[in-house]
């Protein structure tokens, strides 16, 4: 917490407080916006899978680099948004995102120090698990054996999308979302 | 704000995640117990987002048209030759069609045939994919004073698209015939055999339950049947194609992968609840 550190810093004026709040909520808001954009009629195939991939990658990334800006409450809301936008049974997206968040948080000590490649491999495993969990829960809730192909496509998309999303997000992490820069 | 001691605060923050996961499972049960809540939340969200998506859809369609235009330029010569040949064939068919139409009119006149009423329809823009990973559906943007109702039949310019399953105040969800839950009673056009068209979530729904003695023929046209009073008879759906495992499937006439505008027809047939909402129907208030 930078608030507890000694030193001289600007007075907490309203503008500065707003700035800090905006920077703090940046990860959640941007993830939500990306989900809404991914549901728009872009006319490309596999959009629902892309949506899931974006949610998984964003939650993993921000939990890893800045858990303070991706608290469980925000993950819960993002999961709810994902469920409502993707017409999945209510709660499934919430559960998989929260489990992903919890596991990432648990492995953060190791993953935080490891390089990008290791984080990517870890994300691939977690995404595979999350997609499998989603498949199982959806099948259980709809009492139907669902086709596996879309789930596999979602996992592949998530793994492939992660570096594309991580690079701009890492830049945003150091600039836009950095509360110390407020 | 209540001041808590630091250890207590840490303990509480550790509890947040398990509690939220438990709430999520509760949400799952709630969604299963009362499907209406989920539907209402969804349509409320869709209603608020549909105008935004509608705004985006216009320029996006422009971009798609531009890309198509460039691609068309490359094949303009071959296309022209193909179209000329096709035109020749179609002109012959037009002559046949006109003759048959005239003959049909005289026969109907002789039989004192009661003409069927022409159905009313509204046209709506497809603004979003509303299927998710395990379903096939689209979201339509409608005006705030629309009169679309559940069970209306959606067609594009070529054939059957699906049926309206959920209605919001300015949007509607159409379940496509390719969805896993979709079942459409159909007629095989040449043999007049009845069958059921079952969606598989794949691009081609499967033909099932055709009567003994009738075999769906490759390339045969398939139209809706009026059985079960869910569809009017004779709407074009597609043609029979056998896949590699020798299972008859339907190649839909409608361009389900790139729907832009659909028409919702009102045939006054609402006796059958859509499959995924059959539980909901009794409790729902009349609009």
Image (cartoon, rainbow, N blue to C red):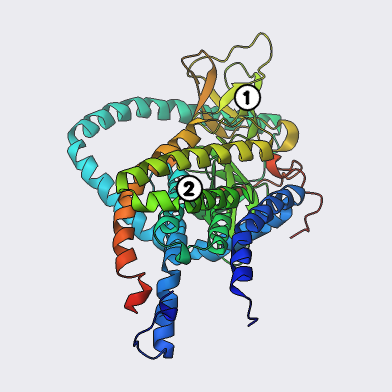
| Residue at screen point 74% across, 41% down | B272
Residue A179 percent location from the top left of the image: 38, 74
Do badges 1 and 2 share one subunit?
A: no
Circle 1 sits in a helix, a strand or a loop, which is it?
A: strand
Taking the image as drawn, is residue A26 in sight? yes
B227 or A12: which is nearer to us? A12
Q: Is residue A148 above or below residue A29?
A: above
**Residue A52, which numbered label?**
2
| Residue at screen point 47% across, 19% down | B219
**Residue B187, which numbered label?**
1
Q: Is residue A116 above or below residue B191?
A: below
The quadrant of the rendering that contains the N terminus of chain A is bottom left
Distance from disc 1 to disc 2, alpha carbons, whole Å, reads 38 Å
Q: How many marks?
A: 2
- What is the chain identity of the residue bearing mark 1? B
B105 or B254: which is nearer to us? B254
Name the outermost residue toward the top: B213
- What is the chain identity of the residue bearing mark 2? A
Mark 2 burial class by Cα count in 10 Å: few <14, some 14-19, many 20+ = many
Taking the image as drawn, is residue B54 in sight? no
B170 or B123: which is nearer to us? B170
Depth-wise, is mark 1 or mark 2 nearer the camera?
Answer: 2
Residue A108 percent location from the top left of the image: 44, 53
Query: Quadrant of residue B7 in the image?
Result: bottom right
Residue B84 percent location from the top left of the image: 26, 30
């Amino acid at each position: 917490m930078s608030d507890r550190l000694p030193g001289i810093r600007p007075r907490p004026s309203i503008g500065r407080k707003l700035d800090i709040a905006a920077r703090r909520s940046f990860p959640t808001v941007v993830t939500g916006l990306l989900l809404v954009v991914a549901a728009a009629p872009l006319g490309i195939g596999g959009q629902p899978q892309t949506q899931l991939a974006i949610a998984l990658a964003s939650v993993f990334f921000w939990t890893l680099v800045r858990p303070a800006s991706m608290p469980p409450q925000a993950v819960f809301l993002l999961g709810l948004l994902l469920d409502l936008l993707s017409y999945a049974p209510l709660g499934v997206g919430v559960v998989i995102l929260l489990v992903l968040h919890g596991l990432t948080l648990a492995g953060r000590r190791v993953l935080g120090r490891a390089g990008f490649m290791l984080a990517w491999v870890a994300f691939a495993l977690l995404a595979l698990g999350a997609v499998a969990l989603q498949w199982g829960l959806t099948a259980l809730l709809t009492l139907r054996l669902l086709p596996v192909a879309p789930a596999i496509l979602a996992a592949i998309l998530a793994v492939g999308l992660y570096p594309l999303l991580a690079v701009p997000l890492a830049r945003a992490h150091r600039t836009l979302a950095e509360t110390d820069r407020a | 704000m209540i001041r808590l001691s630091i250890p207590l605060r840490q303990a509480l923050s550790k509890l947040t995640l398990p509690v939220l996961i438990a709430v999520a499972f509760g949400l799952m049960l709630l969604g299963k117990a009362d499907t209406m809540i989920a539907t209402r939340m969804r349509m409320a969200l869709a209603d608020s987002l549909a105008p935004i998506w509608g705004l985006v859809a216009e320029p996006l369609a422009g971009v798609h048209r531009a890309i198509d235009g460039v691609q068309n330029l490359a094949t303009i010569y071959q296309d022209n030759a193909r179209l000329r040949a096709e035109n020749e064939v179609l002109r012959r068919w037009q002559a046949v069609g006109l003759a048959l139409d005239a003959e049909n009119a005289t026969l109907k006149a002789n039989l004192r045939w009661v003409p069927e009423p022409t159905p009313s329809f509204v046209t709506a823009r497809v603004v979003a994919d509303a299927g998710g990973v395990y379903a096939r559906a689209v979201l339509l943007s409608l005006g705030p004073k629309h009169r679309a109702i559940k069970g209306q039949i959606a067609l594009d310019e070529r054939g059957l698209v699906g049926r309206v399953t959920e209605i919001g105040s300015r949007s509607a969800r159409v379940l496509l015939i390719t969805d896993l839950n979709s079942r459409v009673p159909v007629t095989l056009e040449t043999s007049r055999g009845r069958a059921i068209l079952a969606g598989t979530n794949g691009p081609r729904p499967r033909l099932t339950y055709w009567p003994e003695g009738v075999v769906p023929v490759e390339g045969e046209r398939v139209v809706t049947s009026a059985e079960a009073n869910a569809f009017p008879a004779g709407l074009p759906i597609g043609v029979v194609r056998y896949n590699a495992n020798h299972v008859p499937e339907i190649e839909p006439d409608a361009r389900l992968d790139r729907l832009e505008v659909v028409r919702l027809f009102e045939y006054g047939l609402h006796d059958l609840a859509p499959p995924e909402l059959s539980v909901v129907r009794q409790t729902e208030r009349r609009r």
